[in-house]
Image (spheres, coloured by chain):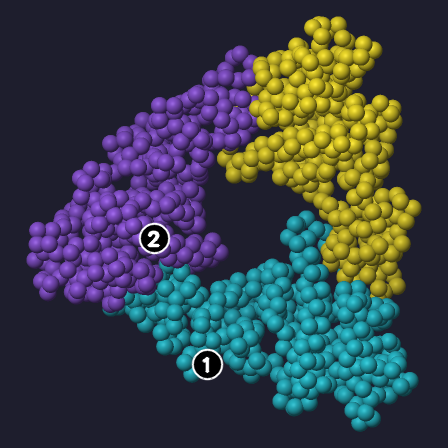
Chain colours: A yellow, B cyan, C purple
């Protein structure tokens, strides 16, 4: 069971071209391509005749021609040609899915097409400000349910154990986190005052002494995650005086650049798209506020982040493997699960609402 | 569910020797070997004692000895020795299956042995005429149900899409085909008049101009397929004047060699033997009426045909993979499916008749 | 269904260290390690929080810390720390299993811990006598149910077929074996008088002429097997005069060393631990009464025995594969199955008794 009336990332923009791309999303085989004018198209990837994947066929202009008998479909999924017969029955069609291109990604709507408003796609205003540079990750692949990764990203405490050598620090696991539920999103946040910088932040910021660190995890259900992690030279000042902005509903941490302290600020966008119940496409990029234009730095940030995410994949895949083996007791929920529990409840309510809607029709 | 009261090809003659051959046919493990006098034997490939495949044992004269405890069975499947005891119970036996050697193949009858008349094996009279040479294919293997391949072979229109670079030509897909149902077989045929030769025919015939092409597809259910494809120098003559014989019930196209036109005639025998519901043994050879005795030509024909068949396997396996993923709608049937639909109906009736027979006993 | 109230070998002693060892036993994932004082510990290998295998975490003193969120458990499975909260609920625990170290192995009790008396572990008094040397095998792994191997080890007749080139001899298959049922064990035995030595015994004993050979197979259900095989220079004497002791209930064959005949005596301990219903851990060592201290000989004995056991694995795995393919008739039982049938009945009774016990509680 998945939330269907929502925008999922289907692919990186550069993945969708005039060469047919096959990708399974929410258990549904999809073929993705671009019209001659560049606009993306998503169709169900099975010819209704004998079910050969259309992705094994070829593009004829904007239409897609099946590689078995030449049956041809337009961008809306309507059949326009059946070799060997004149009449084309109304049933000769494949499902087409609303798609939109934004923030470097191709987004897909797997639910009711009438509700597919591109304005519902999450806003990333920083991309237009010029104050941030993008570090684009490769598409990653999780052999696990997508919620294992939203659980992971709603929970700062795992950093000390899973990412000890990359993002972690000492003693943080015991620091209280603040869980807040807003309309359509959940945040978990904490500030680590007067601490040693984490290994990768020290490598980037070269701090002479202690720093204040902040971590803000935001999940927009079902599966969009935004993770802010930052470090600011403390100079012994109380972090509350710095007005980091972590109290605002948007959790857009203000960068106090006025006093020229070294601030390393990374905002990660981690967007999970379910492939099946037990596998997930994982799209991500990071915004950074430092070293703008520095390609070598960008490469280093991407490498380090990839390494950290791979540590997460190992954990989530081990859990999925255990779950697949069956016969497990009820999970034990503890204090640190407040955020992930809230997200799972929201997802459950979204699915229930969609089913009520469908039943009412 | 399979048709059982029919002869299936179990193996090439050269595959069955004094070395035990294990092969699964209609979901049943079979061990094949030859008696000392050369006659083939087929037994169920599981010792009734502890189910070790008998194919892991060894031949003792004409009998087969289990590799675990030495239990020994004769060519009829009767146990002739149980080490450690004198008495051999009547239940100590394995099923044996009627087999026959014909046309270079070992045939097996998986149904009621009382009905296994070798005269029911399909006749291939051309093999004795000296006017044809044989191009023997390797055994091929389809990761798909055998009916995906009979569908394929009942449908000339796929040639233009699947085999564009080998057998296909332009514009043929729109040509009408004639579907005819006879007693125990279905044919689909068409003539392509005044056309350019297909790539492999041109390579073989070196035609100066246009040709008439014919394609006759015959299926003897459940799974024997005979495919005639031929090309004759048109010299601008109407093809109907050439009396190609495509109207005869046997579809044995007459070769009009009297006037010395270049005629390239290939008759393919494609015999599918189900291994399981989703895998198939694929045996084939081609008869050719040209280049008799030319071994280099024979090699080239086999290579080109193998290439074309591999194009079919790719399509059929992609369809099987999609079907295995489940939750597909009803298939859309169109005009070109007339032949394959008739074949599937015949197969369904054969299975139903066998079950009624079994229920009546 | 497994017998649970019994000691199974979990691991070789050298496998269990301060590095966490993950191993599945009776379908249950287990993590094994040693306390700082060397005593072994076995816990269920899934954190009750999110089911990450604890074997992916690390040891903190004698406790084990989960690699995801740092939840920590003591050697009894009780949670001692939950990062982020003070209170530790009673439900925060993992199952711990009684373990004992004996005869070079770590034993585990997967049933009712109250019944786990280490004195129930099988006795191997020879290990303390100095008259025997140990040839330790590598842990082997069977892709089959453990009872396929107890069947195998209850049945001397397979030796002539499966182990022809290693342990087998001619004509033995027809020799009667004696099956005896004692309280909690079954034996199958036979003596081969005045025979040629088996290949590996001849290689070890270099006999000038015929020998008497004895084979005594003992199974202590569910899955401990002891196999005595020996060869004594016959010198033409009747073997009954040699008092080999095969009639004693314990089947401890006496070695008649008084008259200085060459006696090659191997006592194999083959202990099967079910991993799942279709896979088995196979632990074994051999005691030998000859060539004491000879390391080159030890290596040779281990190599030859490993080779023979691999012959058994091939057979058992082929049977398991056939069983997995389903739809098999009832097995045909014959005279040589008397021992294995008795063992299977004992195992069935043990499982039934445990279930009655559990139902009564």
C39 left or right, relative to B179: left
Pinpoint residue C137: horizontal percent, then vertical percent. 34, 46
Residue beneath the point at 56% across and 14% down? C85
Relative to C25, B336 lies left or right = right
Instruction: Bin the neighbour count of mark 1 within 10 Å (Cα to Cα): few under 14, some 14-19, many 20 and up.
Output: some
**Position of C352 relative to B38 (above/below):** above
Give coordinates of residue C238: x percent, y percent: 9, 62
Along the line of sight, the residue nearer the viewer: A187 or A29 = A187
**Relative to residue B215, is residue B234 drawn left or right?**
right
Separation of residues labelled 1 and 2 (CA atoms): 42 Å
Residue at left offset 39%, top offset 66%: B57
Name the residue at the bottom extreme: B258
The residue located at (82%, 56%) in the rendering is: A58
In the image, residue A178 above or below residue B312: above
Q: Which residue was labeled with disc 1?
A: B39
Residue A338 visible in the picture? yes
Neighbour tally class for label 2: few under 14, some 14-19, many 20 plus, Cα within 10 Å: some
In the picture of the structure, the residue carrying the numbered disc 2 is C303
Residue B245: mark in rendering: none
Question: Which of the 4 image quadrants contains residue B278?
Answer: bottom right
Classify mark 2: helix, strand or loop: helix
Instruction: Using the rendered image of the protein, determine whether residue C219 is visible from the camera's viewpoint.
Output: no
Residue at 81 percent across and 74 percent down: it is B198
Identify the subunit bearing mark 1. B
């Amino acid at each position: 069971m998945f939330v269907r009336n929502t925008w999922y990332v289907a692919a990186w923009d550069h993945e969708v071209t005039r060469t047919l791309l096959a990708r399974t999303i929410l258990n549904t085989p999809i073929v993705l391509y671009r019209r001659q004018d560049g606009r993306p198209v998503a169709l169900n990837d099975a010819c209704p005749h004998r079910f050969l994947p259309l992705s094994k066929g070829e593009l004829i202009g904007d239409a897609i021609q099946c590689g078995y008998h030449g049956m041809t479909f337009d961008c809306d999924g309507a059949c326009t040609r059946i070799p060997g017969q004149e009449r084309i029955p109304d049933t000769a069609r494949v499902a087409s899915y609303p798609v939109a291109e934004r923030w470097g990604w191709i987004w897909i709507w797997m639910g009711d097409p009438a509700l597919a408003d591109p304005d519902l796609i999450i806003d990333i205003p920083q991309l237009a400000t010029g104050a941030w540079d993008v570090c684009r990750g490769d598409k990653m692949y999780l052999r696990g349910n997508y919620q294992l990764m939203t659980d992971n990203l709603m929970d700062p405490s795992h950093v000390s154990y899973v990412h000890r050598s990359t993002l972690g620090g000492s003693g943080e696991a015991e620091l209280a986190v603040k869980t807040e539920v807003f309309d359509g999103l959940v945040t978990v946040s904490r500030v680590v005052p007067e601490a040693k910088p984490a290994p990768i932040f020290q490598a980037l910021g070269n701090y002479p002494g202690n720093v204040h660190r902040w971590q803000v995890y935001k999940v927009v259900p079902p599966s969009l995650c935004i993770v802010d992690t930052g470090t600011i030279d403390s100079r012994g000042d109380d972090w509350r005086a710095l007005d980091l902005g972590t109290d605002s509903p948007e959790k857009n941490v203000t960068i106090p650049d006025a006093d020229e302290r070294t601030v390393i600020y990374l905002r990660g966008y981690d967007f999970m798209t379910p492939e099946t119940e037990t596998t997930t496409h994982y799209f991500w990029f990071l915004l950074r506020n430092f070293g703008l234009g520095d390609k070598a730095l960008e490469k280093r940030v991407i490498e380090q982040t990839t390494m950290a995410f791979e540590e997460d994949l190992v954990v989530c895949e081990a859990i999925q493997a255990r779950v697949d083996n069956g016969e497990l007791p009820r999970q034990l929920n503890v204090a640190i699960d407040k955020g992930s529990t809230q997200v799972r409840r929201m997802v459950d309510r979204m699915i229930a609402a969609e089913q009520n809607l469908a039943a009412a029709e």
